Amino acid sequence: MARTKKKPKGEGGLKRLRTAYTMTREHDRKIGWVCLAWFLGVGLVVGGLFWWFLHPIAGLVTGVPAGLMAALIVFGRRAERSAYARMEGQPGAAAAALGVLKRGWKVQAAVAVTKNQDVVHRVVGRPGVILVGEGNPQRVRNLLGVEKKKHARVVREIPIYDIVVGEGDGCDVPVKRLSKHVMKLPKNIDPSEVTDLLQRLKALDAMRPPMPLPKGPMPTSMKQARQSMRGR
């Protein structure tokens, strides 16, 4: 039986990096020059110090990794900024941005959807209940008001926040700052109360009628958002 050839270690990572660079360059034409400048600048400074005070070989050994690390950090930040720019205004952009919230947060995409593709997502955590709306700001405000009343009957005294996502008038926060905005909200309840709150919300969701879904797939994470935009 013939053995299957194993892929060289690191091939997948290099391919993903190349794909990310190609996608980022579509929005950020200077990304290559910026990363190169950081690589040379940090590499020369760090390497030069070790070269001067210790040994030339020490300068090379430290300068190249330091420059490479600086370039990768800058590339990662600019790639993330580019991904958010691509998502802005797309259905499911807020849900994708909320996908970075991990431990201690429960994100449920599209708890309420209208035929006009106005959507409300729900986040549950230490602050309480956060309702995030995306779509037409005026219509979303009305939809958030309805959802806030429904949730208030179930969660009782627990705080409920409502946020309209977007860049235009009537919006509270852009997509690129949504996750940070949510994480900065005050911690109003204990972790044990979060578990009880989720149980109450399950009862609310069980009473909901079937909702019209927006056209097309709705990404629920940054990774899915990038994959969906890659095929555009």
Image (cartoon, helix red, strand yellow):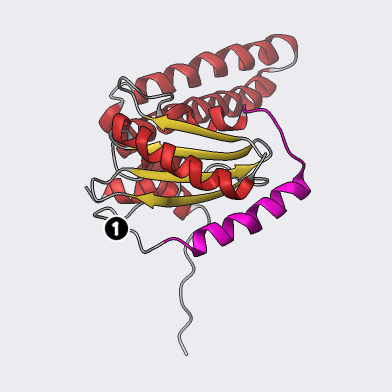
Q: Is residue 202 visible?
A: yes
What residue is shown with label 1?
Answer: 212
The residue positioned 26% from the left and 32% from the top of the image is 26
Q: Check the image and report above or below for 224 versus 18.
A: below
Q: Magenta: predominant secondary structure element?
A: helix
Under mark 1, the amino acid is Pro
- The residue lying at 43 percent from left, 16 percent from top is 37
Q: Is residue 80 above or below residue 107?
A: above
> What x and y, as percent, mark residue 13?
48, 49
Relative image position of residue 204 (x, y in whole percent): 53, 57
Residue 213 position by quadrant: bottom left
The residue sitting at 63% across, 56% down in the picture is 200
Residue drawn 44% across and 52% down?
111
Region rendered in magenta:
185-208
Total labels: the figure holds 1
Which corner quadrant of the image does residue 210 belong to?
Answer: bottom left
Residue 99 visible at all: no
